[in-house]
Image: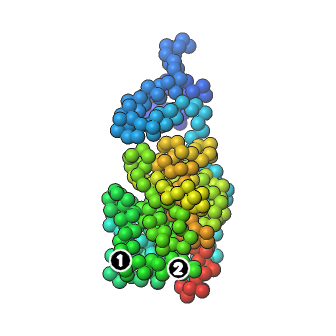
Amino acid sequence: MSAALETLAGHGLDARVIGRPNDSDRIRIADGGTEIYGATRIALQRAWSETTWQLQSRRDNPECAQQEYDRILDASDPGLSPRVTFDPADDVAAPFVSRGARPPIAILRDQGVNGEVEMAAAFHRAGFDPYHVHMSDVIEGRVSLGDFPALAACGGFSFGDVLGGGEGWAKSILYNSRARDQFAAFFARPHSIALGVCNGCQMMAALKELVPGAAEWPRFVKNSSEQFEARVITVEIVPSPSIFFTGMEGSRLPVVTAHGEGRAFFDSPDHASRAIVAARFVDNRGDPTDTYPLNPNGSPGGVTALTTADGRFTIIMPHPERVFRSVQLSWHPEGWGEDSPWMRAFRNARVFLGSSLPRQGKA
């Protein structure tokens, strides 16, 4: 405080302190020790937010609007509370990167996708050699997926992010014989890996008939809020075979979401019980949640990432590639270094290919 006042005074500004924080969660205005006005933070925030709540109740899903408005009543909400169960500074891929081998990865996109740059940057940092591959390259035979041990399907408004944008992308594969054969062969290879994010998550889920072990994966449909959701939320990495999340189990990490159709919809209760979940939305106390906006799309049980029994193929709705550096987060705990904990997911992929590259003949 004193440093701020000295700086302002140095610029000719006669600044004075008129208020300071307290630990009572109450706003108080006083004159000479006599309280002129006082109210709880909850009461004032509810009054401030009432207009927004009324508008949301009419425009959006009223149940979601009510859930968001009622969250203000939770006076003990701790806010974003990350928990990291590993050392993000430990570069597990370093032994492989130091050998100079950079396995190629296809950074896959289609019409409207705009997340390919961040995805390529994250995988490059982890020790891959990224190649931007458009679906037209595959369909027209300019690129063969047989040249890649890994692919990443990116997000960002494929086909306008409407009417199942990722499903439209999937249909350009399923209904084109060359593309279908390429993807079927890629997924069938014993050491290939793939990550699908956002629209890429939708797309890979819609390709589940080609993905070994993905029969129980859900479709991703319109958010329960009936709106596009762009937020910072918390997900928990749960125990699973996913090679991307090896060693990250139990971590609760902030991440950005940006989707209009991210709600997991399972074909049957049996599929929901058998699907292998890799991550889920949790509240600020670490409990799985269906409550909006901590669960921004209404997926049951907070499901937001799934994988296969062998862990080689993982889909996730939020965007880890957009926060692989700590500075990309709007807030993070003090002490986080250059790499955010999400960087481990990309390095895990490099570690996996470190052992399988010789068998595939890739460099």
Q: Position of residue 146 (x, y in %)?
A: 46, 83
User: Considering only order in the chain, which callout, 1 or 2, is on the residue closer to the N terminus?
Assistant: 1
Q: Residue at x 57, y 58 (%)?
A: 270
Q: Position of residue 236 (x, y in %)?
A: 60, 53
Decide if residue 328 is in sight here: no
Foreground residue, 211 or 267? 267
> Which quadrant: the C terminus?
bottom right
Q: Are there few (<14), some (14-19), or many (20+) residues within 10 Å of tag 2?
A: few
Q: Position of residue 92 (x, y in %)?
A: 64, 69
- Dot 1: element: loop
Q: Residue at x 47, y 29 (%)?
A: 45
**Three-letter amino acid code at the position of disc 1:** Asn
Q: Are there few (<14), some (14-19), or many (20+) residues within 10 Å of tag 1?
A: few
Residue topped by disc 1: 176
Reply above or below: 305 against 227: below
**Three-letter amino acid code at the position of disc 2:** Ala
Label ID, residue 188: 2
